[in-house]
Amino acid sequence: MNYTKALNNPIFKIIAQASEALNIESYVIGGFVRDYLLQRDFKKDIDIVALGSGIELALKVSELLPNKPKVQVFKNYGTAMLRYKEIDIEFVGARKESYTHDSRNPLVETGTLEDDQNRRDFTINALAFSLNKINYGDLIDPFQGINDLENRIIKTPLNPDITYSDDPLRMMRAIRFATQLNFEIENDSLEAITRNNERISIISGERIVDELNKILATDKPSIGFLHLYKTGLLDRILPELTALNHVEEIEGHTHKNNFYHTLEVVDNICPNTEDVWLRWAALLHDIGKAPTKKFNKKQGWTFHGHEFLGGKMVKKIFERLHMPLNQKMKFVQKMVMMSSRPIVLAEDIVTDSAVRRLVFDAGEDVEDLMTLCEADITTKNPAKFKKYHHNFEIVRRKIIEVEERDHIRQFQPPITGEEIMELFNLKPSREVGVLKEAVKEAILEGDIPNEYQAALDFVLNRAHKLGLKKVE
């Protein structure tokens, strides 16, 4: 079957011209072909395989392009990359690979197109379009990958045990593609992932997290996380999460399954491929419940302090998986530690002081916190569902009202520590800290407005009680 229409971008003709000049064959392979056949949006990257030197082909293509783009060469991998009109094009020579048991880095040697397609992870990623004069635009499909596209199946070109054992990251990729494309993983392949799940231990945390982030950015991450759970991968990657999948009954009292609840919460957060960190917060918001779970005859099941413990566990997970320990980690920590605060407000009478404290503690992240808490409503009781959402709407309105009046979100004390030291001729001391904290508490409690004169009068009065005299 011919797909010349797929190759209407001028870059393909230039690659074909460069290939002919070098007397080598070249093919478009992988994601571009798969996504074109699925009629998915083009993701701005193209993989080219050459029967010869991929680096030489990249240099020749650059030479033929008007702006002579810079070619990045990766000699160790035999690959090269250039950018053409915001499209990243990677060139590699056709190769065959063999693996040792303790590494996902293959031993590489020059190969044929068939060898190169054999080494691909899935049949749907082994599809290729020819860029050669004799059969330009023809689909090269040795594994019936187009049938798997039509049947929406993830399947490996070769024996799945070999494919996954050679490069265990492919187990994560299978689950990620199944989640992104809403495909089924072929049963033999799924069983092979389960058999080989311990092999994930040789994969770096960074690569695992990259796949988790892509799953979290999909419309329904629970599909991927259920696959990860059922194949045993999740227990090896995030045992804190699988620990939530235990429901106990004592004296007729049971608690909800916090694992399946968590997946519902994650799905309830709208996907954002630019920022998956709120979904990370949703994924980890209840991880403190397993270690804090206790049964009390009067109260039933309790999880006291699970938010605080969960926040501490977040840092350990980020460290273990080599995730960023910057503001992103702090954001997830904050969301986990504060995840119950708006819920308590929504259940009680919403006071101005409680809202001021919520906004003060959450700061610029208060909207994300409210989104997380609304996603946390997974009750199947329509009356309760409606009531909780109505209550959260009241909290949201109160936040806007209090913020417009008191400007708490980016709170800066109206009177600074330096001014307090000048007023009373003090050096940095405990008294200065006590007065600053008293001003903050008075504003948050609503005892004084968030204004300079009110704060000054309050400080003068409080300082007098502490025996401090204003410098005249």
Image (spheres, grey):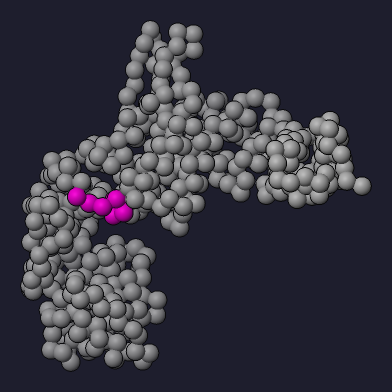
Does the magenta run of residues contain 206?
Answer: yes
Q: On the image, which quarter does residue 387 sit in?
A: top right
Q: Position of residue 35 (x, y in %)?
A: 29, 64
Q: In this view, does 460 lie above or below 288?
A: below
Does the magenta run of residues contain 28?
Answer: no
Q: Is residue 56 above or below residue 107?
A: below
Answer left or right for 118 relative to 59: left
Q: Where is residue 176 in the image (x, y as percent from the top left)?
A: 29, 51
Q: In this view, does 467 lie above or below 40?
A: above
Query: Which of the pair 451/43 is nearer the observer?
Result: 451
Report the number of numbered marks.
Answer: 0
Q: Which residue is drawn at 58% across and 32% down?
A: 341
Q: What stretch is highlighted in magenta?
A: 202-208
Answer left or right for 178 relative to 354: left
Can residue 104 be seen by looking at this rendering? yes
Question: What secondary structure characterizes most of the magenta part?
Answer: helix
Q: Quadrant where the N terminus lies?
A: bottom left
